[in-house]
Image (spheres, rainbow, N blue to C red):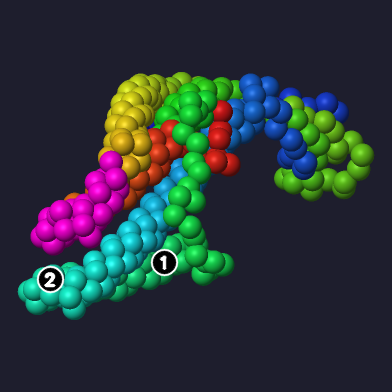
Amino acid sequence: MLHAAASAQFSPELEVGPGVGFTNSTSLLSQEIDIFGRVRRQAVAAQTEVEIQREKLRRTEAEASAKALISFSAYLAANEAVLNLNAALAASQELLAATQAQGKIGEAPELHITRAELSALRAAQMVKSAEADLLKAGAALNSLLSRPLDKPIRVGAWSLSTGESSSVPATVKIAQAKLAKAEADRNLARVSFRPRLVAGIAADVWSLDRNQINSNQLGFQVGLKMPLFNRGRKNSTIAAADAEISRARSELAAAERAAELDIQFAKTSLESANSVRMAFAGDIIPRGEKMLASMTSGYRKKLVTLLELLEAQQTMNQLRADKAQADNDMRLAQVALLLAQTAFPGQENN
C-alpha cells in the first residue's frame, strides 16, 4: 500500500483565484489558511514521535540501571565471600593451634597436625582468590559508575523497594505511542488531500502589456486549490495508514501480554528467592553455627575427632556460600522485577 501511494501519479489540480480590484494578477505575498487543521495534526503526529523516543530512552535508562545494580550485587557477593572465607580461615587457624597444642603433649599424632596445617593453608589461598575476585568486581562496578567508589561498601548495603508499581512498562508505552502515531498519521493523510485555501496580496506587475505600475495593480486575492480527481494516491495512502493502525494495535496487545507475563514471572522468582534467603538467614545458618560450636567444643574435650570437626567446618563454609548465593539471587530477582516494570527509583512514569 505504501508503494502504491508513493508510485501513484499526482492528480491535476483546479485552482480558483478571484481578486478584488484587478484581475490577471500574480501573487506577491500570501498565507495558507489551515481550514482543516493540518498544522494541528502535524503537531500531534510529531508529538507522538517524541513520546516514542522518550519511552525508548526510559527503557535504555532502565537497562543501564539494571546493569549497574547487577554489577553492584556481584560486588556485594564478592565482598561477602571474602568475609565468609576469612571467618573460615580464622576457624582453621584456631583448629591448627589447638591441634599443635595437643601434639606437644602427645595427644595428637603428626598426621593430624599436618592435616590441620593443610586445611589452614587451603583456607588462606581461598581468601586470596576471593580478594582477587572482589577487586575485579569493584573494577567492573567502577567502570559503570565512571568513578571509583569513595569507600568500601559494607555487606547488606542494599535497599531496593519492589512494591506494587503504578508505572506502565516502557515496552507497553512504546507500543501505545506507536498506535497513537499511526492514528495521527492517518488523520494527517486524510486532510492532506483536502482543498487548500490561500489568501494574500497580489500585484499585476508581470502582465505582458508592461503598463506603468500604479495603485490599481495591487489588491487582495483568495486562492483555492483542490484535486480534480483521485488517481489512487489518496486511497492508497489512507489504506496504508489503516494497515499501520491495525499492526500497531496487534503490537500493543502483544506488548501488554508479554509485559504481564514478564512481571508475573519476576514476582514469582522474587518470592521464591526471598523464601530461600529467609530460610538460610532465619534457620539454616543459626543451626549450622550451633552445630559447629558444639563440634569445636567436643573436639577440645576429645569427644569429636579431627576428621569430624573438619567436615563440620566444610559444611558450615558451604552453608555460608549457599546463603551468599541466596542473597545474590534475591537481589537479582529484585532487579529483574524492576526492569520488567520499568520502575527504577526516579524513573516512574504513570
Looking at numbered disc 2 in the image, what kind of residue is underneath it? Ala
Residue lying at 84% horizontally and 33% vertically, measured from the top left:
219
The furthest residue to the right: 215
| Residue 8 screen position, x and y as percent | 37, 33
Crowd class of label 1 (few under 14; some 14 to 19; many from 20; radius 10 Å) = many
Read off the magenta span.
287-314
The furthest residue to the front: 105
User: What quarter of the picture does the C terminus occupy?
Assistant: top right
Q: In front here: 200 or 47? A: 47
In the rendered image, residue 305 lying in the magenta stretch gets the answer yes
What residue sits right under mark 1 in the picture? Answer: 138
Q: Main secondary structure of the magenta part?
A: helix
Whole-angstrom CA distance, mark 1 to mark 2, is 43 Å
Residue lying at 74% horizontally and 46% vertically, measured from the top left:
206
| Residue 322 screen position, x and y as percent | 25, 48
- The answer to whether any part of residue 335 appears in the image is yes
What residue sits right under mark 2 in the picture? Answer: 108
